[in-house]
Image (cartoon, rainbow, N blue to C red):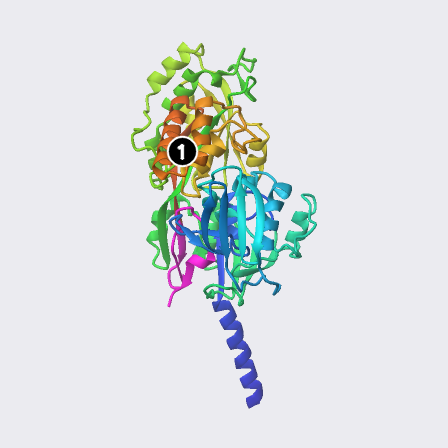
Amino acid sequence: MRSLLVAVLSAFTLVTSAVAQTLTIGVRGGPDSIDPHFTATGTHAEALKHVFDTLVWSGDGLELEPRLAESWKPLNDSTWEFKLRRGVKFHDGSDFTAADVKFSIERIPVVAGPNPTTIYVRRVKETRIVDPWTIHIVTDGPAPNLPNDFIRLFVVSSKAAAGLTKETANEAFNSGKAAIGTGPYKYVSWQPKGDLVLARNDSFWGTKEPWARHVRKEIANDAARVAQLKAGQLDLISRVPATDVDALKRDAKIGVQTIDTVYVFNIELDMRDKAHNVTAKDGSPLPKNPFQDLRVREAIDLAIDRKALAAVAMEGLGLPASQMVTPSIFGYNKALGERKYDPAAARKLLADAGYPNGFRMQFSFTQDRLPGDRQVGTSIAQMLAAIGIDAQANAQPAAVFFPARTRGEYSASMSGWGTLTGEAHYTLSSLAHSNDKERKMGAFNVLGYKNPAMDKLLQDAAVEMDEAKRRKLLEDANALLEKDRQRLPVVAVGSAWAMQKDKVTIKPRVDEDTLAMNIKPVK
């Protein structure tokens, strides 16, 4: 009997310990696949940072830190040398070497899906293995931002992912067969739009994680996420809706932390000759695309009350935005002032442009990606109605919105963009440069915006190694984007996390990533 009692108590202790070491969080959005190269969507990368390491790490404030690369330096204007970390093991026990880096770089253009991850390796012309711990990256000219781009260069096992195509890669990764990384957690299982289950990698080269098991529950419904936290079913939730922040702060069992992020909600307007879902108010065709007229674009800009969006639609969890990058980003133009709100001037501009009664358009936006996206999008539609534009609100799940946007189906839309590398060139070269496949710029500019002066500024900034000169080029590009008004920044996104106060604490990141590595148990 004594032996049986000891056995039972020991088993109970083990179970209790395992539960105590399990971190369960509720996130608004999860991965779209387990292949880290499938898409550049932020929630996708956020989840897979646990399983796959990057060559360079983006710190909590977006500062560059060593990761799988211990150091890096330019050897000449078109070659970077990366010295790799020795002794790193993949989850299957195999060695990490330069061959895996080369393989990962070269597979991205082959397997990238919607929101292509090719943006992170677009400057790479060739990869040369010097030895197992040294790799030379040959670029298509001077590439001062290459280390910044490599914060999203996830390294996969060249052995586990060998031979996979765009058609077969997702299945192999989702099954776990190819989901072999070097990160602090191992892949256990995943249900799309459901739970991602991870187990601690006890052979991780870095600091050992306190959590033996990490469960990421994708709960798109904000109210459900909050309810499960309050019921004690979750240890922490991300992207707390602004409407619940104050109430949660008053709950003695709940802790709340907030931060201003680098994400900016912005409106994108069609510059092509034929716009989709833009008509006269009676539904008849318009003789031309109204967005091609600068006066119309300026009218839309003037119709937006950014302070009201930040204070009301986001309930204080945001800031008015006048540029596509936030003030902490390299290349932010301090000389540019706040965007004006003047609906009377907007109505006059519409009349001058030949639309005294306005027109009708579909206005699309995400409803489940960033905090407040549905509320901000709906509020903008109402503001446009006040100047005579019948903007029909079309809220979509991010999984629907982004592929449709990439196909060019939305002529007027709003989404969030974060300058995750810390430098404005990442954002502007993706969104404001003309869509140029040869130069590998403008990959996310799908609505025909093209200004040769903008292209030159961004092309020059891409190769300018002098920091002061590069900053000036990017500041000028931000000023030109404001002048052209094809893309209208409206509000910078703030974010909040809520947690069981007696169990966990979190160190927030400005890129809004919710990582188990930043969540610690309360001592």
Q: Quadrant of residue 329?
A: top left
Above/below status of 431 relative to 188: above
Mark 1 lies on residue: 324
Residue 109 position, x and y percent, is 61, 41
Q: Is residue 423 left or right of residue 89?
A: left
Q: Residue at x 39, y 20 (%)?
A: 298
What residue is drawn where x is 68% and y is 52%?
162
Which of the two residues, 217 or 52, is positioned nearer the viewer here?
Answer: 52
- The kind of secondary structure element at disc 1 is loop
Residue at image position (44%, 43%) is 420
Q: Indicate yes or no whether the magenta region holds residue 508.
A: yes
For the question of whether residue 167 can be seen, the reply is yes
Q: Quadrant of the C terminus?
A: bottom left
Whether residue 407 sits left or right of residue 368 in the image: it is right
Residue 346, quarter of picture: top left
Task: Please give the range of residues in magenta.
Answer: 497-523
Q: Nearer the viewer, residue 493 or 432?
A: 432
Which residue lies most toward the bottom here? Answer: 2
Rendered view: 33 above or below 231? above
- Disc 1 residue type? Met
Residue 201 is one of the magenta-drawn residues:
no
The answer, for residue 514, to whether it is visible in the render is no
Between 246 and 72, the one nearer to me in the picture: 72
Q: Horizontal and vertical percent for residue 231? A: 45, 57
Q: Nearer the viewer, residue 414 or 224?
A: 414
158 relative to 281, above or below: below
Position in image of residue 100 (x %, y %) = 60, 54
